[in-house]
Amino acid sequence: MNKIVFRLFLLVVFLPLAFSVNAQNQLPDWALGPFIRPENVNPIIAPKAESVFFDPMSRQKIAWEASDVFNPAAAVNKNKIYVLYRGEDRSGNGIGKRTSRIGIAESSDGIKMKRNPEPVLYPNEDGQKEHEWPGGCEDPRIAVTAEGLYVMLYTQWNRNVFRLAVATSRDLKHWTKHGPAFRKAYHGKFQDLKCKSGSIVTKVEKGKQVITKINGKYMMYWGERFMNIATSVDLINWEPALNEKGDLDLIVKPRKHYFDSDLTECGPPALVTDKGILVLYNGKNRGDADRDSTYVANTYSAGQVLFDLNNPSKVIARLDQPFFVPTAPFEKSGQYPSGTVFIEGLVYFKKKWFLYYGCADSRVAVAVYDPAAKK
């Protein structure tokens, strides 16, 4: 191997890792991080064929998380972190062809996980059959009120229309489904809207990350390809923000030649800081000439965007480089070999931030930001 070829080889292999470290170490003061992967612990959750439960759809016992586990939410309860993740069975082949259910694992340190053998949210004989059979329940995000009510925003998938839905719980294990988040808004105008990925706005108060109000209402950022806003008075029924034409107000859009050139999908619960409202999101790179050539085509990396607290639709700042990119082998294999770190769970626990993410739609992993180490 001549010197030129060898140098090109080193560039291709090590540039993504070097760029990730460099981007994290140079985060602006308004951004959250750097998030560091603990050594020799990831992935923290992997598929498990031994987990079996009685499935109401097929009327038989199935291995509900035997194929893949990914895209986790996270919450704190009684001094433990609970990770609620998406598990797929082996009922089909290909992305979106299996049934998804949401499982739960608990941890005293945020890393070592004790899993529940059965899912806690799944397509059942209930009022949501038309929205969840046969595709299931996907991609949860969870936030909690100061009074202890956990609110989950998840995707209902009936293999026709995917919808953002709401469920609530007091213990993270027993959930009440409330149906599509936008079904009542504007007299049902958006009840069949294809929508997903809701990040409720939260704030750290007295050491706990809890849901907060913005301008007198609960608020979330939501959306897959574009980022939007919705508000609520009860955390169950949500009203999307509209522009002067009566269409959805698209406040963040993909950018050509950037890591988020294909989509900007909301991640974990948004966070009020002394700088504004911070949203961590998932950016997908395009596969054509408009992509960011620094990264592999179709790669999912993570970005951050800051909004004005007094005008939550106004962008103050946005990272031009991702703060978190796929580097580990299990982040570049599985169902999504182009490379995926998909962030959905963020909790403040023992004065540290724990970020939980899906790896190539096949595993669950964690990264940690210690504010004390930054001082």
Image (spheres, grey):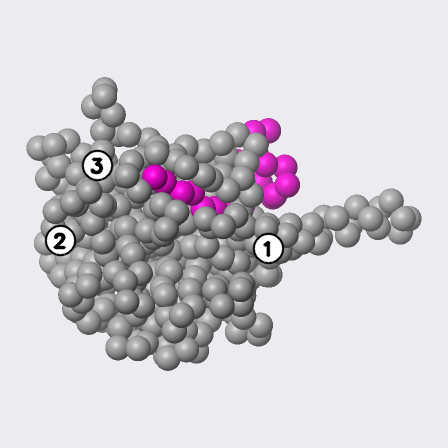
Circle 2 Cα neighbour tier, 10 Å, few/some/many (<14 / 14–19 / ≥20): some
Residue 119: x and y in percent read 27, 69
Inspect the image, locate mark 3, and give the three-letter code of the amino acid beneath it.
Answer: Pro
Q: Secondary structure at mark 3?
A: strand
Front residue of this view, candidates 318 and 366? 318
Q: CA distance from mark 1 to mark 2?
A: 42 Å
Range shown magenta: 286-308
Q: Earlier in the sequence, mark 3 or mark 2?
A: 2
Q: Which residue is mark 1?
A: 25
Question: Is residue 196 toward the left or the right of residue 366 in the image?
Answer: left
Q: Residue at x 28, y 30 (%)?
A: 249
- Mark 1, mark 3: which one is toward the viewer? 1
Q: Secondary structure at mark 2?
A: strand
Please name the predominant secondary structure of the magenta segment in the image.
Answer: loop
Q: Residue at x 54, y 39 (%)?
A: 320
- Mark 1, mark 2: which one is toward the viewer? 1
Q: Residue at x 89, y 51 (%)?
A: 1
Q: Secondary structure at mark 1?
A: helix
Inspect the image, locate mark 1, and give the three-letter code of the amino acid beneath it.
Answer: Asn
Q: Residue furthest top?
A: 245
